[in-house]
Image (cartoon, rainbow, N blue to C red):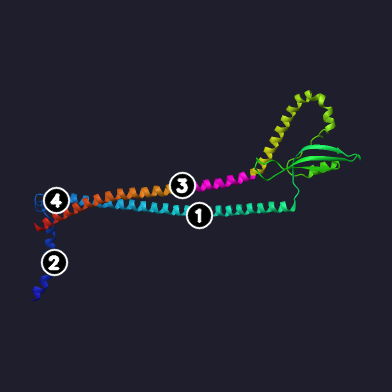
Amino acid sequence: MADDDVGAPAAVVSGDLTCSPCVEESPQDAQVEGVPATTAAQSIDEAAKWKERSGRLGNAVNQQKARIQELEESDTRLKRLLNLAKRSIESKDASIESLKQQVVELKAAAAKQGRPKDPRRILHKVKHVTHAGQTTLWCLVEYTSDDDDESRPPECGWLAFQHEADLLEYVRRASGEPVRVPDLSLPPSDVLQMVPYCSYISFFVPHKLDLSDELERVQEEFRRYRVRSGTVAFISHVSTVHVEITRKQKEAELRKISASALTKQTEQIGGMDLQQELQAARVQVRRFSQLQTSAEER
């Protein structure tokens, strides 16, 4: 019994060692129902290739998803900037409305207080002499106005000055463009004396009046341009901000549409390719399983 117990493990070991070469199949045993062993090896290689390609496609899909996530984050940042710009514009609009209201209130207060009006130009200057020999200078003054309605006639009024120096001091204190003091207009008696020279006046005076009117028109346009320049600059700035916001909105929409189209296209292509590849891989695996089962039965 001792000899049998000692010899048993050796027999087992020797049996294992002698049976290990039996695992290798001969070329005759590898053939299953007329299918060579190379076909099974090719099927395994093709299945490995399909698996590797599926892995690459999965990596590509993951990269596309990461890119789409980056685009969504960029879109979120743009939306945040757009909201900030909208709030800034709303704040500026509120400030503009407040300033307009203040201007209206200041105009109303100035009208109540009887603020002195600024002269725009002096139309006529007339010298009046009383019977006592006292001289008074009367000037027809056209005043400035904040109203841009050109259909309304300008506001005018007569002002009296005792001396020429008083008139010059009044002109000097006027704000805005320098006011030109015209020459004295002729009194009625002098006009009657000038009747013989009407033909001479009718030839030269119209040309002088045309030039004076043109000069006054240019001065008036220049004044209005200066008044409106500040408003135009501010409106231009606001328009630029609106245009920039609109452009950013369109760019964000285009990015979103492009990302959506890319996602759909990638999903369609990836889905079709993966489905076809998985179906082919299943066929190959099923075929390999059948071959392996047949080989085991043999």
Residue, far right:
132
Compared across the picture, whether 74 is left or right of 126 comes to left
Q: Earlier in the sequence, mark 1 or mark 2?
A: 2
Indicate which disc residue 83 carries: 1
The amino acid type, in three-letter code, at marker 3 is Lys
Residue 122 appears at what percent x and percent y? 77, 39
Q: Name the one closer to the observer, 234 or 288.
A: 234
Is residue 49 visible to the viewer in this orientation of the structure?
no
Q: Which residues are magenta?
A: 230-246
Q: Nearer the viewer, mark 1 or mark 4?
A: 1
The amino acid type, in three-letter code, at marker 4 is Ala
Residue 81, relative to residue 5: is it above or below? above
Name the residue tied to disc 4. Answer: 37
Compared across the picture, whether 1 is left or right of 61 comes to left
Answer whether residue 233 is magenta in the image.
Answer: yes
Residue 194, relative to residue 43: is it above or below? above
The amino acid type, in three-letter code, at marker 2 is Val
Q: Nearer the viewer, mark 1 or mark 2?
A: 1
Task: Please tell me whether mark 4 sits on a helix, a strand or a loop.
Answer: helix
Disc 4: CA contacts within 10 A as few (<14), some (14-19) or many (>=20)? some
Name the residue tied to disc 2. Answer: 13
